Image: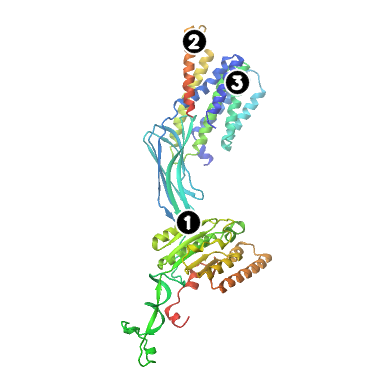
Amino acid sequence: MGLRDEVNVTVVAFVLSVLLGIGSLVIGYSQAGFADPVRWFVVLGFLWLAAHWQRWHWFSPVALLLAVAAAAYGVWKEFRTVWMILGALGGLLGWDLFDFARRLRYAAPTDDIRGMERRHLERVAVVVILGLVLALLSVYVRIQRLAFEVAVGLILLAALGLTRLVIGLRKY
Amino acid sequence: MSRSFLPGVIVYSLILASIVAVRGEFIALALPFVMYLLAGFLRAPDDVKLEAARHLSTERAAPGSDVVVTVTVTNRGSHLEEVLLEDILPPDLTIRVGLSRHLVRFAKGASYTFSYTVSGPRGGYGFESVEATIKDRLAVTSRKVRLEAKGQLFVFPPVTRLRHVAIRPRRTRVYAGMIPARVGGAGTEFFGVREYQPGDPPHSINWRASARHEELLFSNEFQQERVADVGIVLDGRLRTNQFTRGHSLFEYSVLAAAALADALLTQGNRVGMLVYASFLRWTFPGYGRVQRERILYALAHAKPGGSEVFSDLEHMPTRLFPPESQIILVSPLHEDDLSPLVQLRAQGYQVMVVSPNPVQFELSYLPKTQTVELAGRVVRMERMLLLQKIQRAGIQVLDWDVNEPFDLLVKRKLSRPPAWLRAVGG
């Protein structure tokens, strides 16, 4: 498959995701006055993009871990949380799309690649937006007083959810 | 490693960091990953019921010819968002057109059919299954299943048509055929004269011989022609077939064996085949088209191989062949083979050796230097001596330079001469 064939919607979305993740980290760190890591983030972004075309499949998980580690460090250092969340989110998107693009290479030219791309991007977008909204809500919405009964109910709900999750995971 | 592992590790690490640092922002950082994992797990396919069926355009093919493989996979279970179907190809088969791997989406009850074209060298190939890798909508979970879809493809060796293969075993069978039976009776070839017996047709009276006697009449007697038992032994030993740089004479031996078996069966003989390689593969003797198929199946599967036990011909199970029958050994020959061949002859078998010439074969691809030429001369003389010794034991030898078509060699060496030539003793 040539370079021309590979330039599809997924690749464009992947590039945008990397730009979002790395860009957010760069802005967040720059605002806090950390200039040195910014250069390394840019290098990481370039390497991640190069990894796609060079088919270094091992690099994408490493890049995700580095992006999340950088975001976590930023959170710990009390940089602006929104940039850090966006940085981690960009990393997650980049990692997912990198792998999706790799899976698409298995498809035969006669397969419905466009349809698969469209559906996958729609789903990932929904999941990521929901995640972002939840994350922002958890950061910016402060509940000053929580009734004891509500807290117990939430704990029970969390326990139930965890139980269902473990049962579900056992299948795999 | 599952794709859920990395987001899982990140989520747990961030929760741990949140507890250690007593900072809720770490949890916020983990939330998109939690959402991602939950979305994957919640929509994971739970009811996987895929069925596969295979169809081959032909089950018997010639080497290198195209065979279209069609695979149909049907989803009897729930909707599957991403399924990677990969047909597992037997080794040595190559795809010429199309792909054996497809990424598809299966609605409930839907079918997907894909085709591709393969070709391969001589051999028997078994298609076993199609591998399906099923992923959820975000590919967080993955499940591999093998869908049974059996199929068989036999790539038979090319069969060169030989017009006639003249053999003369000591013993023939009772049925009429084309092999001279060394017995007088009805036939086409003159065998001798005997005293006239009532019932002999007048045209069989030998008037010239009868004229010499006043009171007796003599009748011509012809040689009966019957079918015979023929055992073809295909030598697949590595020590005789394998040469430097991966070259092998085995394919030529297979070609010769196939051509001989076909010709002898066409003549009505009972033919058996023994492939003598790392193990013995014996095709029980039989007649006709069915036997031709059996022998071609055996030849399709024949592979050269080495073993300590069968490194020389001494362990050839001669009891497989009927006494005094014709044995045709197809082998490049080794100097150690002289004694077993002489023993075979001594046991009463009529032995013929068809020997693809290994010296000519090896010289054809070696560089033409003075050293190689000198070595070639020495080896050629050694082989000539070996063949002479074998011939002296009463064994017919066909030394085959594989650059020459096999049918030409057989025509020259094994064809029955025309009647007029036989009449003048040619």
For label 3, the SS is: helix
Q: Nearer the viewer, mark 2 or mark 3?
A: 2
Q: Are marks 1 and 3 on the same chain?
A: no
Q: Residues under labels 2 and 3: Cα distance?
A: 27 Å
Numbered disc 1: what chain? B
- The answer to whether any part of residue B86 appears in the image is yes
In the foreground, A137 or A53: A137
Return the residue at label 1.
B300
What is the chain letter for disc 2?
Answer: A
Local crowd size for mark 1, using a 10 Å CA cut-off: few (<14), some (14–19), many (≥20) = many
Specify few, some or many for label 3: CA neighbours under 10 Å numbering under 14, 14-19, or 20 or more.
many
**Where A102 falls versus B62 (above or below)?**
above
Question: What is the C-alpha distance between the residues marked 1 and 2?
Answer: 75 Å
- Name the one closer to the observer, B346 or A145: B346
Q: Which residue is mark 2?
A: A151
Residue marked by disc 3: A72
Extreme residue toward the left, this view: B199
Location of residue B45 in the rendering, given as x and y in whole percent from the top left corner: 43, 30
Q: Residue, x 47% and y 19% (percent of image)?
A: A161
Query: Helix, strand or loop at disc 2?
Result: helix
**Where, by quadrant of the figure, is residue B48 drawn?**
top left
Task: Report crowding for label 2: few under 14, some 14 to 19, many 20 or more residues within 10 A (C-alpha).
Answer: few
What's the residue type where badge 1 is placed?
Ala
Task: Tell me the kind of residue under disc 2.
Answer: Ala
* Residues beneath discs 2 and 3 located on the same chain: yes
Nearest to the eye among marks 1 and 3: give it.
1
* CA distance for labels 1 and 3: 64 Å
A91 to B265, vertically: above or below:
above
Q: Quadrant of the N terminus of chain B?
A: top right
Q: Nearer the viewer, residue A132 or B174?
A: B174
Chain to which the residue tagged by mark 3 belongs:
A
Q: What amino acid type should be assigned to the residue bearing mark 3? A: Ala
